[in-house]
Image (cartoon, grey):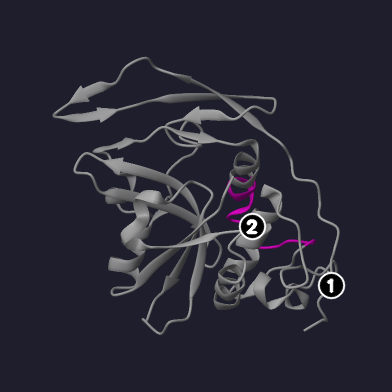
Amino acid sequence: MSPSHRLPVPRARRVRLVALSLAGALVAGGVATSVAVASSGGDEPVTTANADTATRAPEADAPASDTAASAAPAAVTTSPAVQAQLDYVREHWDDTESEEFGVLGDTDCVNFASQSLLARGWATDDEWWYSDSGNAYDHSDAWLSSTALMEYLDEHPERATALTDDERASVKVGDLVQFDWDDSGDRDHTGIVTSVTTNADGTTTILYAGHTDATFDRSVDTAITELHPGGTAYYWSIPE
């Protein structure tokens, strides 16, 4: 592993979406539904029911339950920084090659999550950095490893606050989700939260995107009950 060093950070694209919300809500069978329409623009924050509802298609292999048809998305305010992060994720979630960051074989999830944080505006430091060699194996441990990233964020509360799955109602779009598949205490997978929905029964549905395997809008519940039964989800809440 190369010695820790500080690298210049590419300037993240700033994107604004102006949401045109339909007045009121449609109520059917006791379930409220809200709709948002987005268009591109300048720098002000935007308020939408879901940061990318109007332009994003559900993940192709997601079960019907992942789309949460009976859910009412809660209105959230998305800053330009978070929107830039989400735009990056949407554009690159299925990329298999990157000249700038490289791809880390079948464990590229944290490399991709770190790229999304860079697009959000995070600055590299002596522990969390990437090499400009284009070789993913040259990046720092915290940039590449789910467990190392957990330890890094735990030591930097100014960057993120740890949440358990019991606190998922506090999770926001743009936060990180990490998984412990075997209850070992390590983190085995990392994704970026793309949707947080409050359901009619008061529960919260969280969708995420990530690399290895390439995923967009996969349900956290699907991951820990169907794909990896017994797995546990954790979150890192990132201040805007």
Rendered position, 182 above or below 202: below
Residue 132 in the figure: left or right of residue 216? right
Q: In this view, does 115 lie to the left or right of 165?
A: right
Frontmost of labels 1 and 2 is 1
Which residue is painted at 48% across and 76% down in the image? Answer: 188
Q: Can residue 104 be seen in this view?
A: no
- What amino acid is found at the position of numbered circle 2 in the picture? Asp
Q: Residue 212 at what x, y percent from top left? A: 54, 68
Q: Is residue 96 magenta?
A: yes
In percent of width and height, residue 192 lies at: 52, 56
Q: Which of marks 1 and 2 is nearer the N terminus?
A: 1
Q: Residue furthest left?
A: 29
Q: In which quarter of the image is the C terminus?
A: top right
Residue closest to the eye, 13 or 213:
13
**Residue 87 is at least partly visible in this image:** yes
> Residue 174: percent from the left, percent from the top?
54, 49
- Tell me the SS state at disc 2: loop
Residue 94 in which image quadrant: bottom right
In magenta segment, residue 176? no
Residue at x 75% of width, y 45% of height: 12
* Amino acid found under the numbered disc labelled 1: His
Local crowd size for mark 1, using a 10 Å CA cut-off: few (<14), some (14–19), many (≥20): some
The local secondary structure at tag 1 comes to loop
Residue at the spot of label 1: 5
Instruction: State which region is magenta.
Output: 88-100
Q: In this view, does 134 lie above or below 67?
A: below
Q: Is most of the magenta stretch helix, strand or loop?
A: loop
- For the point 33% across and 49% down, the residue is 205
Q: Name the residue under label 2.
A: 95
Label 1 with label 2: CB-CB less than 8 Å: no
Residue 191: numbered disc? none
